[in-house]
Amino acid sequence: MVSSTVASFLLVLVASFFVTEAQRPALVKGLSWSFLLGQAAGLLRLYFHDCFVQRCDSSVLLDGSAGGPSEQTAIPNLTLRKKSFKIIDDLRKRIQAECGQVVSCSDITAIAARDSVVLTGGPNYDVPLGRKDGLNFATEQATIDNLVAPFANTTTVLARLAVKGLDATDAVALSGAHTIGISHCTSFTDRLYPNQDSTMDKTFANNLKRSCPTADSNNTVNMDIRSPNVFDNKYFVDLMNRQGLFTSDQDLYTDRRTRGIVTSFAVNQSLFYEKFVIGMIKMGQLNVLTGGQGEIRNRCDRRNKDKKVDIATVVEELEETFSALF
């Protein structure tokens, strides 16, 4: 029931995608068919940024406190969609209204990521559940050290994932999440200015320069130029045509260690789906909290309040215990 509740809500966000071009009337200025599709990519990215830092414990959802700034203020997380945080907590409210406080924000985030993939055309898969929510957030340095920067090369990508038990195939498959969503210009304009990256297709680069006329432009572009609103294997076709947006994307095809994997996914979408699902399930189990560890938050953005000890109740329980013994 929990999974279907999440799916129902997300379906509203992506329903416009399933209207064919022939059925679509003209739009007025300011409207877009893909406006809400960005939420699917945002929820998927939120899950990645949560899992890769400490574990899949929804620590990235926690607001800051007197104990220090939250993960949300770390540089790699500044571009996480604010709406994604609101969606997760809205789902939490809906689920708790139906089921009580029995499903963690961590599990909700995992299910939302899966359903974002499914509802944009990607593979369906079962999500192992039972995660508990973390009691604290990671430091900014830990966030930076564990997430893969857009300017990272393949050596860095493989090294960061290897320490988490993820191999080269996992790394390439999970990078395929860039088949949906958008990027801010500042995440890749180092490849355009002052000098153009030689591994970038010239026509592709010229088009990017029109969208991002300066290195510090605030504009955004699609991650996948072929089918930006569909979770498919076209991202890998982009890489083979030297049209990957980030260095961390394009270098997967440039590097001999991962080039063959990219090619195999580009020509076989089913293979990509299979390996992506494996990577997601492996990532979703990284050092998770279960059983008596962590908690199930009443609100996703803050820890549960510590229960106050009722001294009178404790004394009464002790008296009953001693009476039973003697």
Image: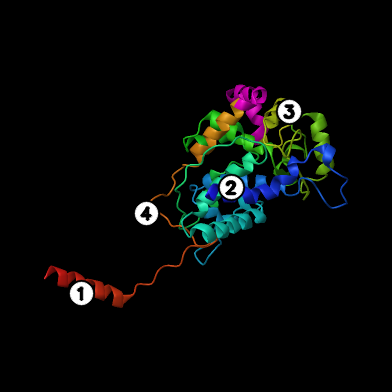
SS at mark 2? helix
**Sequence-earlier tag: 3 or 1:** 3
Q: Compared with residue 140, is residue 153 higher up or lower down, i.e. above or below?
A: above
Residue stretch rendered in magenta on the structure = 248-270
Labels 3 and 4 touching (C-beta < 8 A): no
Residue 212 got which mark? none
Q: Which colour style is shown?
A: rainbow
Marks 3/2: CA–CA distance: 32 Å
Is residue 184 visible to us here?
Answer: no
Marks 4/2: CA–CA distance: 24 Å
Disc 1 crowd, CA 10 A, few/some/many (<14, 14-19, 20+):
few
Magenta stretch holds residue 250? yes
Amino acid type at circle 1 is: Glu
Amino acid type at circle 3 is: Arg
Marks 1/4: CA–CA distance: 28 Å
The residue indicated by pointer 2 is: 112
